[in-house]
Amino acid sequence: MPQKKILNKKSLAFLEKYLNNASPTGYEWEGQKIWMDHLRPYVDDFITDTYGTAVGVINPKAKYKVVIEGHSDEISWYVNYITENGLIYVIRNGGSDHQIAPSKLVNIHTKTGIVEGVFGWPAIHTRNRAKEEPPKLDNIFIDIGAKDKEEVEEMGVHVGCVITYPDTFKILNKDKFICRAIDNRAGGFMIAEVARLLHESKVKLPFGLYITNSVQEEIGLRGAEMITETIQPNVAIVTDVCHDTTTPMIDKKRQGHTEIGKGPVISYAPAVQNRLRERIIETAEANKIPFQRMASSRFTGTDTDAFAYSNGGVASALISLPLRYMHTTVEMVHRDDVENVIRLIYETLLNIKSGETFSYFE
């Protein structure tokens, strides 16, 4: 692949539309429709399942199957309790950060449309500065401007309504992409771009390629657990995000050193098949793609784990996109890293032969 810029205006327009759309865990279908519409010209077929995972397939009749995967869901909140004076208390849907909630605008999704609200917080003048109360799950609340519980319910809001943030995509200082839900709709975007490049380059792969956008990763890798049983792949290359550890209050001795702008992050972990990982590293070195390394202890915490331990064992690896401020509304990644993750997955696919087991015993 030439070393020119990969992302074009159409790509960035898709990324913006895809990120701006709300796709909370359990409610991913509108985002999946956007993703599938973009991917449609580049694949031969689609697979979908009951819970909303979407898979674009190239060479669907091939027996040897390779998955490239990201997940489509974003963290959110549920309405959990409505007070008599019309305030709303919440519980998490995924790893939503209670500390960033106060003063944030929110969208409450109801059957009749969006109800807007705010996470309220006591004014600084009214708080006891000698004993500041930090934001906690049991003291953050949403105000939708209703006078009482009855008015809240008349507006269509009830226990179980899902809540997202409305923050939208921006480009900061020319090459930093910021938005909520970059974790991990960036993954779905990058694997779709791989499919586009394969199509435009007229590459004929010797295997079936399953471009997989899984649901429900944020609550325990559930979508990947389901779809891997449907696909039954031989190889899975997963992409997710990892932490940029160079910002304040992160301990590098515990978290390692990874940084935006320095390239894709290749993981070491029991779930990562060593020979497949080495193939990815060799590919990066041969194509002069910068990369970083990260060690995970017992598990990666990504869909890699779900694929690896399925179907009697699937050769799996993880390529991560370094990101700042994970699970906030200002998640930040570097354009160069996005392009280099795409480039690395693309070149790795060209370096996989049909029938490979990556076994140590051959």
Image (cartoon, helix red, strand yellow):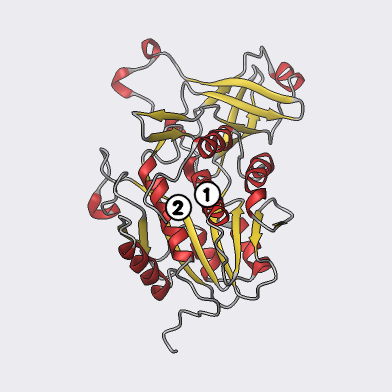
Q: Position of residue 135 (x, y in %)?
A: 43, 29
In front of the other: 116 or 58: 58
Q: Which of marks 1 and 2 is nearer the N terminus?
A: 1
User: Which quadrant does the N terminus fall into?
Assistant: bottom left
Please tell me which residue lies in front, 354 or 216: 354
- Closer to the camera, 3 or 78? 3
Q: State the residue lying farthest toward the left.
A: 253
Residue 106, labelled with which disc? none
- Residue 266 in which image quadrant: bottom left
Q: Which part of the image, by quadrant, shows the C terminus?
A: bottom left
Residue 166, given in percent of the width and then of the height, sits at 55, 27
Residue 304, given in percent of the width and then of the height, sits at 49, 62
* Residue for badge 2: 342
Crowding at mark 1 (Cα within 10 Å: few <14, some 14-19, many 20+): many
* Image side of residue 110 versus residue 11, left or right: right
Residue 73 in view (yes/no): yes
Residue, disc 1: 193
- For marks 1 and 2, give the CA distance: 7 Å
Q: Is residue 33 above or below residue 169?
A: below
Crowding around mark 2 (Cα neighbors within 10 Å: few <14, some 14 to 19, many 20+) is many
Q: Where is residue 184 in the image (x, y as percent from the top left)?
A: 50, 46
Q: Which residue sits at x=41%, y=58%?
A: 344
Residue depicted at 43% across the width and 62% down the height: 347
Q: Residue at x 40, y 44 (%)?
A: 5
Residue 232 image-quadrant placement: bottom right
Say what secondary structure mark 1 lies in.
Answer: helix
Q: What amino acid is found at the position of numbered circle 2 in the picture? A: Ile
Left or right of 73, for residue 287? left
